[in-house]
Image (cartoon, rainbow, N blue to C red):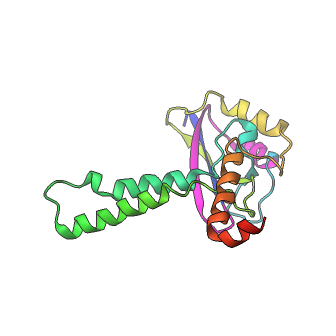
Amino acid sequence: MKNTVIEYRYQDGSNNKAFKEEIFAGPVDEASSARITAALVPSDDPDEIGNFVPGQVGLQDLQNAFYERHMLLAKAMGSDNLPQDAAPAARAAAERFDALRDSMSEVKPIWWPDDHPLHTIVRVEGTDKTPTVEKTIAEFIEELEATEWDGSYTPPFYDEMIANYDDFIALESPDEALDT
């Protein structure tokens, strides 16, 4: 295996999960894996390697990925992909996904009060896949080791997600919004 895949996950307070994998140039060995684990915030789960904040080391934060993934799924299951001669039952089912997609487009990604910046690395292993990031695994490990993890870190889309949360709360309880 000439390269290294790192798969990481974000899990919110409602147990929704979003995954991403990145491929780094260069192989990983036991010593490299141990350095990665040592550089992370320890996990309570023995099946997990450790926690980190991807945005602090140039990787994508995944807190808003649930929305994107659900929108893509609703679109894929909708009527846009049905053949013209689809059965009425299939068309009816697809139209329900169209309605779901339309209603979801009115509710944007939200940063809930129990959301946090930590993501979990769940897999580090060799691969022959082409790198997806410009840094080598050695450079990435050095970056991990040099990073002091910031529990108050906010991703670039944080302000938008907080505003969406405020809008959502105002819609859920309009009487309380008038009192403020």
Q: Residue furthest right?
A: 148
Q: Residue at x 66, y 29 (%)?
A: 136
Q: Is residue 118 visible?
A: yes
**Residue 50, x across and y down, in percent:** 74, 54
Foreground: 120 or 30?
120
- Does residue 130 lie above or below 42 as drawn? above
- Residue 100 on the magenta span: no
Pick the quarter of the image with the C terminus: bottom right
Query: Residue 128, how many percent across, how many down?
Result: 50, 36
* Residue at the farthest top position: 134
Towards the viewer: 153 or 28: 153
Q: Position of residue 51 (x, y in %)?
A: 75, 53
86 relative position to 111: left or right: left
Q: Is residue 45 above or below residue 27?
A: below
In the image, is 26 to the left or to the right of 100? right
User: Magenta segment range?
Assistant: 12-38
Q: How many marks?
A: 0
In this rendering, the answer to whether 151 lies above or below 134 is: below
The residue closer to the viewer here, 14 or 22, is 14
Does the rendering let one see residue 120?
no
- Tell whether position 33 is magenta: yes
In the image, residue 121 above or below residue 45 = above
Q: Would you say 115 lies left or right of 64 here?
A: right
Residue 59 sits in quarter: top right
Q: Residue drawn at (55%, 58%), measured in percent from left and top?
A: 107
Residue located 46% across and 54% down the image: 71
- For the N terminus, the quadrant is top right
Instruction: Looking at this view, name the residue that lies furthest to the front.
Output: 178
Horizontal side of 146 relative to 22 (left or right) equals right
Residue 30: quadrant of the picture: top right
Q: Position of residue 169 (x, y in %)?
A: 67, 65
